[in-house]
Image (cartoon, helix red, strand yellow):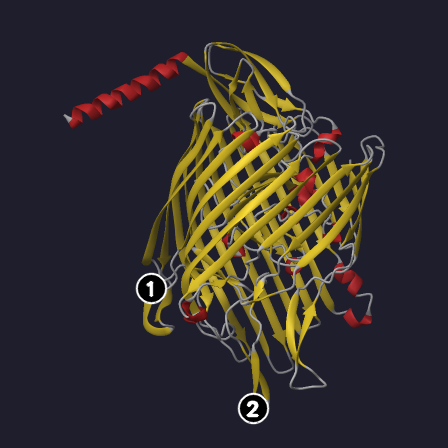
Amino acid sequence: MLKKIAVNLILIFSTTLFVQAQSKFTVSGTVKEKSSGETLIGVNVVVAEKPNVGVTTNEYGFYSISLPQGNYTLRFSYIGYEQELVPVKLNSNIKVNMNLSEGISLQEVVVSAKKADDNLTNAAMGTEVLNMKIATKVPVLFGEKDLVKTIQLMPGLKSNGEGSNGFSVRGGASDQNLILLDEAPVYNASHLLGIFSTFNSDAIKDATIIKGNSPAQYGGRLSSVLDVKMKEGNNRNYQMNGGIGLLTSRLTLEGPIQKEKSSFIISGRRTYADLFARLSSDFKDVKLYFYDLNAKANFAINDKNKLYVSGYLGKDVLAASNLFGSNWGNATGTLRWNSLLSSKLFSNTSFIYSNYDFNVGFKSDVSEINFNSNIKDINLKQDFSFYLNSKNTIRFGFNLVHHTITPTKAEGTDIVSNKKSRKGLENSMYVSNSFEVSEKINIDYGFRFSSYSILGGDTYNIYKDNELVESIELAKGKTGKSYYNLEPRASLNYRLSQTASLKMGYARNTQNLHLMSNSTGGSPTDQWIGNSYNIKPEIAEQVSFGFSKNFNNNKFEFNAETYYKTMQHQIDYRDGADINTVPDIESELLFGKGRAYGLEVLFRKNTGRFTGWVGYTLSKTERKINGINSNNWYDAKNDRTHDLTMVGIYNLTPRWTLSGTFLYTTGNAVTFPTGKYVLNDMVIYQYDRRNADRMPATHRLDISATYERPSKGKYQSSWSFGLYNVYGRKNPYSIDFKENKNNPQKIDAVQTSLFQWIPSVTYNFKF
């Protein structure tokens, strides 16, 4: 009987799909920017006769809508661009491509590339899409447009400190953020120890930050996804633009390879701080600079197939004479094939390469020592998007990643390292569905299945209570321990009214790579390690609730989200850990759990001459690890109670734009000494509870002004003026403890501050 019922259900389901396929036709296509030919992400395509029927273009600019036979009008709308109405006669599957023109200049300061009430209709939670035009308006350090610095001004994202590009999201450490550049992971997204990010804004199309409740196609990190996409290049006209600043200059060239069929973009940036340093005889042997190079090309094979090739190379160099030298950097490459398999099925196949390495060397008259580390990935990724109907979009695919991780090893005159590279295989598959249940309810749900296998070629130690109990030697070609995890995700949006909605979400994430760091801000010498026999995958489960309310015809919006997150298999160093010379870093590790909870509030003005937002975060982040703080809960390094940001952008005249930011943050949790004693003429400090103290609070006001010069033919230019830290606040970078020179029994706390009253001037041009 059960067999008959199952067969009947399958027949009914198959017949329903068949009838739908016979009675409906599909209109699909790609939406691009008219002036450059760049595909546009998140464009709203709505059927005018059926306002509740519509879709948004995916990350490759593609859309698909299935409708009964008849005559319709498609409305294409995108903030900052002119709306287009296109009549279609639907009696077969057809393709309608669209080119949108930019709208009036006042709309160019809108924060996100989404429809005005997207926060009320979209089921996604904790998600912000940043249009790069906003990054040109927000004042930042040294006047350098910076994607990461701008994102740090949103609630829920906390900067790791003054001058740092590292950030933490909802209680997660900086390594728990997945940072992607054209789908390739970036393991260190900062230059000059965090003063600048690796993202050259002139080469970036857009960026999306997702705080924990990420769709099923993303995985591998606990806290957030920062998905950055490079521009594709103008396929209609050649164009050059750039900028000259006090410390950096940049230049971008783009244009068609074959007009309207293929294009390229090449963008470079370099700082020249070392050139100014050499003007002084005291620093003539100092090297201090970084450079970035972004390149991308795309080729339209035919109407249904397109090929993309993109790459990034960045390097930092810091050296003093021949005594000290350090360099570190990222290299990524992506080969991507977009294919329209049918009017409803879209495919994206990617081959991805990523490499991060650092080298540090010290030299004297009698000896030399070098430290180096590396992490290298080779990745095959396959994604499918199936537009079942106007209410269901199904995504599914898989991802295969081969990791090669070389831990920090020392080599030199009297040192021969026997450390080997460790290899791991990280695999995943996923399926998800965006489902419009009714006019009031939208649901996104899906599952991700992930695994991590230890591969042979090295010896793995097993520790109990930090004591070695067993060693396992894995030969090449052999597979050691494997870990498997199921990661369900779901989010729901309920429309209370035309101007308000409620949201809720749940997500389970796992992480198989871990960053070993002894600082909050991070440094290039921090080393990545993978799962082992001691280190298990980190796991986080997050539940969140949200409320959104729009006012005055979507001119203003209010969003509030609260969350509670639990974390398993969290890693920390044991008290008194030797992290510099220990043969195996795993012998110094302890494991436990964590929790984070908080409230995030955002009030934003989206249109008009004055735009901007106020964001506030109230949060708590704790860890509980056996062997630390008497096995009790303690504050994590990145725990900060209050974070307040205010951003304002004012179009004073058609040519002058004024902007300012103010931020206030509670100081990071730190461990200060509680006493001292002298042993063999050396001062030894005593410490009590982990992270029981606080750095002083940080607050700062930054301002900037941009002047758009009158155009001369095709030549456009502008001047940007800025002042970082207007009232000269000496914000803490670090605090050291030193013995008082006049009273050896007294200890002085000495604060180091980095930046005070930093002016900037930048000249930008385009032709």
The amino acid type found where label 2 is placed reads: Asn
- Going from the N terminus, do you reach mark 2 or mark 1 first? 1
Quarter-of-image position of residue 295: top right
Q: Which residue is mark 2?
A: 680
Nearer the observer, 747 or 577 = 747
- Give how far across and how far down residue 359 sits, in percent: 58, 65
Quarter of the picture containing the N terminus is: top left
65 relative to 740 in the view: left or right: left
Identity of the residue drawn at 51% across and 20% down:
52
- Answer yes or no: is residue 389 visible: yes
Q: Nearer the viewer, mark 2 or mark 1?
A: 2
Disc 2 on helix, strand or loop? Answer: loop
280 relative to 439 in the view: left or right: right
Marks 2,1: beta carbons within 8 A? no
Q: CA distance from mark 2 to mark 1?
A: 45 Å
Residue 474 - label: 1
